[in-house]
Image: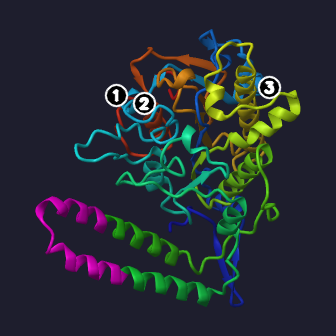
Amino acid sequence: MNSLSRRTLLRGAGASVMLPLLESYAAAGAAPPRRLIFLNFGYGPSESWYPTEAGAGFTLPEAMQPLERLRDSFSVVSNLTNIQSSGTGAHWGATTFLTGANVRRTPGREFHNDISCDQVAAAHLGRDVRYASLALSGTDDDVQGAGPGSSLSWDALGNPIQGISDPVALFSQLFGDGGMSLEERRLLLDRKRSVLDAVRSDATGVFGEVGKRDKEKVDEYFTLIRNIEKRLARSEAWLDKPKPDAPMSLPSPVLEGTPEIELMFDLMVAALRTDSTRVISYRMPTKSLFAEFEKETGNSAVGSHPMTHFGAKTSVAYKQLVWRDKKICSLFATLLNKMKVIEEVDGSSLLDNTLIAMGSGLHTGHKRRNLPILLGGGGLNHGINHVYKADETPLGNLWLSMLKHSGCPVDSFADSDGPLSGIFG
């Protein structure tokens, strides 16, 4: 770990005293680190989401009205497409959101995803922090409206990364010790390593017995083992380093809808403030929000999928979809506000140093063109509807641009054909 990466440790009187993260950076004269957040909501939005004007000073559409006072903190990115992933299920708005993969591309394989953008970022931005990335999901995970995977994150082999959906579990991971002493945690790691050694030994014995066609699968298996070994080594390296003090109290275990999402946002901000991670993805729940729709409007909610096939714009289903879209933008405003008021060592805000993308992998009617994408923070010039060439600008161009803006040494991602012009300079 380099001297600027996390926090300064002072040794004295047999104890370790951690300076707060901000003091550590200030003492070292370093600028705050750059961070990335990726947010996704299931199914596409209503037409109330899309602005009709390009450029600065565009009229906010109905869905974005909750963001009126934050025009200087976000922009709209229009006409991005994810058509390479069109072979996926019609409702898979999350599975390929950060991968851009054609999951049917490999003959003989029913499903084959690629690495997600956040994991590419984690390999570079997450080297000096306790958690290279955090993959989060909602407790009401609406699989039909999201697709395979329990988060937005997929590893280098295209395997799903388990999402953390319990706020209490996330809090414990960030700030707790599981009620175990340092020695007990060390013994637990040793047991995991012993099991992994036994698995490796068994797999090595099998390797010489399989045919040529199966060797690729065995190679993939060994790669999985190596990845687990890396995670164990990372856990071991951080084992005797105290976790930061929690900047918030232990969360309630039973929350749904808006309170759940806002709590996850609080935990995300806490993770960034303590430099526990610099890359976060969150597959947001939306199904649990509909109880609030019923309470606020007096209408009986329909399911997520029927909502997107609303029929007439006078239908309850359409009203519910518009309500959902406004709620998503309201929640996005909540996150921007939380981060905007947190000051960093150089006088900038946490939001200035964190680039946030929020959207869906589906347009209205389950299309994969002109995806609904908002971009916030990152120290960019905002308040603009950036309109790109329709049907010809890959979503991968945005992910490539975000990676490069954050200092990741990459030249391409998924089906990208170059960084987006006009946003990142």
Disc 1, SS? loop
Q: In this view, does 395 lie to the left or right of 204?
A: right
Q: For residue 77, what is the image quadrant? A: top right
Mark 3 or mark 1, which is nearer the start of the sequence?
Answer: 3
- Nearest to the observer: residue 102 or residue 312: 312
- Asked if residue 375 shows in the view, the reply is no
Q: For residue 355, what is the image quadrant? A: top right
Q: In this view, does 83 lie to the left or right of 74?
A: left
User: Do the CB atoms of the residues marked 2 and 1 lie less than 8 Å apart?
Assistant: yes
Q: Which residue lies furthest to the left in this view?
A: 212
Q: Give the image location of residue 365, x and y in percent.
A: 55, 22
Look at the image and say whether residue 336 sits in the magenta stretch.
no
Three-letter code for the amino acid on which mark 2 is drawn: Asn
Look at the image and say whether residue 220 sits in the magenta stretch.
yes
At horizontal 80% and vertical 39% (from top left) the residue drawn is 291
The residue singled out by tag 2 in the image is 397
The answer for how far apart the CA atoms under marks 3 and 2 are is 28 Å
Instruction: Please tell me whether the stretch drawn in magenta is mainly helix, strand or loop.
Output: helix
Q: Give the image location of residue 198, x and y in percent.
A: 34, 84
Three-letter code for the amino acid on which mark 3 is drawn: Arg
In the image, which disc is placed on residue 105? none
Q: Give the image location of residue 34, x and y in percent.
A: 57, 47
- Asked if residue 314 shows in the view, the reply is yes
Disc 2, SS? helix
In the image, which disc is placed on residue 417? 1
- Nearest to the observer: residue 223 or residue 383: 223
Q: Is residue 206 left or right of residue 319?
A: left
Disc 3, SS? helix
Mark 1 or mark 2, which is nearer the start of the sequence?
Answer: 2
Q: What's drawn in magenta, residue-wise?
A: 197-222
In the image, which disc is placed on residue 69? 3
